């Protein structure tokens, strides 16, 4: 596909729009990738800016994918879910029945999350935002995910969250690194 010419918002240089897979680090997560999305590439400053359709559904789909993850949540994933819910650290820690400093250590990766806290984070997210359950129903994953809550394993391999945009919203696939 031939790239369309644009002007870079960062430096004013020549930029073009291309389709490519994009590591969506703006989410606060290093394991989220948008599949075949339009990205504005600047030849001068080398900046990359994704063109994201339906941002709300994208963030909802990332949250659902994290809840669906078969391994324990990482600290940055707990932070993503907390921020997705619009909760501050004090209020979220109170919901989980833990101290704010404990939550901070989990979110910063200084302390692993316990199985009980992991399940509670996922459950709180589902209860606090009913649109997550609606998304799970549309994807046909509700029963499988609710059953998985009792079988979350320690993470042995990193999980890559791959998101794909379709006309009716985003879908996701969880890929375990070999």
Image: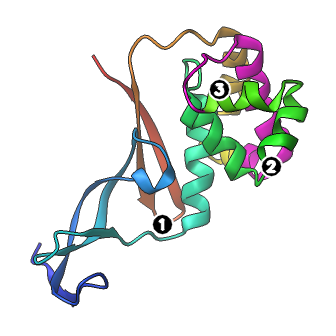
Cα–Cα gap, marks 3 and 2:
25 Å
Residue extent of the magenta highlight: 108-134
Q: Give the residue displayed 40% in from the left and 41% down from the top.
A: 30
Where is residue 32? Give x, y as percent: 42, 44
Q: Which mark is residue 167?
A: 1
Please say whether residue 102 is visible from this viewpoint.
Answer: yes
Q: Residue at 29% of width from left, 81% of height from top?
A: 10
Q: Is residue 140 visible?
A: no
Is 130 inside the magenta-drawn segment?
yes
Q: Please name the predominant secondary structure of the magenta segment in the image.
A: helix
* Residue marked by disc 3: 105
Q: Nearer the viewer, residue 164 or 7?
A: 7
Is 128 placed left or right of 160 in the picture? right
Q: Nearer the viewer, residue 44 or 173?
A: 44
Instruction: Tell me where residue 93 appears, x and y as whole percent.
Output: 83, 33
Q: Closer to us: mark 3 or mark 2? A: 3
């Amino acid at each position: 596909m031939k790239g369309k010419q644009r002007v870079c918002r960062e430096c004013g240089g020549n930029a073009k729009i291309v389709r490519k897979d994009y590591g969506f680090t703006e989410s606060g997560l290093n394991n989220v990738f948008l599949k075949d999305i339009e990205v504005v590439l600047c030849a001068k400053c080398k900046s990359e800016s994704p063109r994201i359709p339906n941002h709300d559904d994208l963030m909802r789909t990332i949250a659902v994918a994290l809840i669906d993850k078969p391994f324990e949540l990482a600290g940055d994933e707990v932070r993503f879910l907390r921020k997705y819910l619009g909760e501050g650290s004090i209020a979220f820690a109170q919901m989980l029945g833990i101290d704010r400093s404990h939550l901070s250590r989990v979110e910063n990766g200084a302390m692993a999350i316990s199985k009980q806290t992991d399940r509670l984070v996922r459950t709180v997210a589902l209860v606090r935002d009913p649109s997550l359950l609606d998304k799970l129903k549309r994807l046909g994953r509700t029963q499988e995910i609710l059953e998985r809550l009792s079988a979350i394993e320690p993470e042995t391999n990193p999980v890559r969250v791959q998101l794909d945009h379709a006309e009716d919203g985003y879908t996701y696939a969880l890929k375990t690194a070999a």
